[in-house]
Image: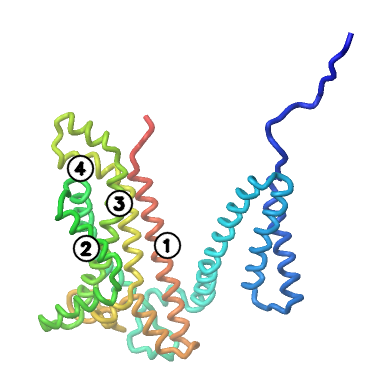
């Protein structure tokens, strides 16, 4: 009587695989080797060390994964490694920008700086602030938003819900063209109108130029959000006998309101830092001018340019320029946080 020899080991369809902590180990090894190579070769730039570490990380990942898991899995890991390396490379300038701006901007950024204007303070003297610039930027951006947001949203509604034929194609073409025009062109266009009507620089002229830059962004973002609304919602509303305009107002817009608001906020952040139109049309003002429809007015981007241009790489004007830059970055960050909050608040409720 013969007895069959059976294998007691559990069968598995999975091959050998690297542990989950292996990418971190590869990264640490790559950094250590890169530092050693940099020191031995006399490389003083940390950017060069980082590039060497990135190349070593990809090579080590592929070599070890190909030996342990096979070439097919190694190709997947090397693609993931390229994604991580590209992400870190893109993160370096952002972190560097924020670090430099914060480290240099906090020198004079305080309550006095935010609540006082330059007035008669000379560029080389300490003191002064950005209150007039903050007030001017808020008024100019708010007026531009009041002009561009309704026009952009209504244009997008027409293109998605009603637009057919040559007119819709022409509008889409011109929106694409406007998306790529330089900001200086928008400023020159408004400046030509001001010269025709013999008008002096004033804040609202800058708002008109900023609205031109903002409109195509609002149109494009709103158009994409409206396209994401399922057609079944429109058809269900129309099947109940609801007019199309009311369907758009009560069904389509509330469903996409979060995305539309986010697009408008991103457009505001886009125009908040524009300098060329403000330089041409507003001119700047060291004193407070709360009336955007009369006289020159200050603006944060223009204030930063003027202070940095009048400095020699150091001194009070140089510090004020960095502090104003930090304020502008904080303003844009607040806008993005507000956009996320509104998007979450106005998002359609999916639960019962």
Q: Which residue is mark 3?
A: 260
Q: Which residue is mark 1?
A: 333
Q: Which residue is mark 2?
A: 174
Query: Which of disc 3 and disc 2 is earlier in sequence?
Result: 2
Q: Is residue 94 above or below residue 238?
A: below
Q: Position of residue 88 (x, y in %)?
A: 57, 61
Query: Which of disc 3 and disc 1 is earlier in sequence?
Result: 3
Secondary element type, mark 2: helix
Please report contact status of discs 2 and 3: CB closer than 8 Å, yes or no. no
Which numbered marker is on residue 248? Answer: 4
User: Can you say which quadrant of the picture contains the N terminus?
Assistant: top right
Please report contact status of discs 2 and 1: CB closer than 8 Å, yes or no. no
Q: Position of residue 219 (x, y in %)?
A: 25, 57
Relative placement, left or right, of 254 versus 44 is left
Foreground residue, 76 or 207? 76
User: Can you say which quadrant of the picture contains the C terminus?
Assistant: top left
Nearer the viewer's eye, disc 2 or disc 1?
Answer: 2
Label 2, label 1: how many angstroms apart (C-alpha)? 30 Å
Instruction: Using the rendered image of the protein, determine whether residue 116 is visible from the camera's viewpoint.
Output: yes
Q: In the image, what residue occupies the spot 26% across and 81% down?
A: 280
Instruction: Using the rendered image of the protein, determine whether residue 132 is visible from the camera's viewpoint.
Output: no
Please report contact status of discs 4 and 3: CB closer than 8 Å, yes or no. no
């Amino acid at each position: 009587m013969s007895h069959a020899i059976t294998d007691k080991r559990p069968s598995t369809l999975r091959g050998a695989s690297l542990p989950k902590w292996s990418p971190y180990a590869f990264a640490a090894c790559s950094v250590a080797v890169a530092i050693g190579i940099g020191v031995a070769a006399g490389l003083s730039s940390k950017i060069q060390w980082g590039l060497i570490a990135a190349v070593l990380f990809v090579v080590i990942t592929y070599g070890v994964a190909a030996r342990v898991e096979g070439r097919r899995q190694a190709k997947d890991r090397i693609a993931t490694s390229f994604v991580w390396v590209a992400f870190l490379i893109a993160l370096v300038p952002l972190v560097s920008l924020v670090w430099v701006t914060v480290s240099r901007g906090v020198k004079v950024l305080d309550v006095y700086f935010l609540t006082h204007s330059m007035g008669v303070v000379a560029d080389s003297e300490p003191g002064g602030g950005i209150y007039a610039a903050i007030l001017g930027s808020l008024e100019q951006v708010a007026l531009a938003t009041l002009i561009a947001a309704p026009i952009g949203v209504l244009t997008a509604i027409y293109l998605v819900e009603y637009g057919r034929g040559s007119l819709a194609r022409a509008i889409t073409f011109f929106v694409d063209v406007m998306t790529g025009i330089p900001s200086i062109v928008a400023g020159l266009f408004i400046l030509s109108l001001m010269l025709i009507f013999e008008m002096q620089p004033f804040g609202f002229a800058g708002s008109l130029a900023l609205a031109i830059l903002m409109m195509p962004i609002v149109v494009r973002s709103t158009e994409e959000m409206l396209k994401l609304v399922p057609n079944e919602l429109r058809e269900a509303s129309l099947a109940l006998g609801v007019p199309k305009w009311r369907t758009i107002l009560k069904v389509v817009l509330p469903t996409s309101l979060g995305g539309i608001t986010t697009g408008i906020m991103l457009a505001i952040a886009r125009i908040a830092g524009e300098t060329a139109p403000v330089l041409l049309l507003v001119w700047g003002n060291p004193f407070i001018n709360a009336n955007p429809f009369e006289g020159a007015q200050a603006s944060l981007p223009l204030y930063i340019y003027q202070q940095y241009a009048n400095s020699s790489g150091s001194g009070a004007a140089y510090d004020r320029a960095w502090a104003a830059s930090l304020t502008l970055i904080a303003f844009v960050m607040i806008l993005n946080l507000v956009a996320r909050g509104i998007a979450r608040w106005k998002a359609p409720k999916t639960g019962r």
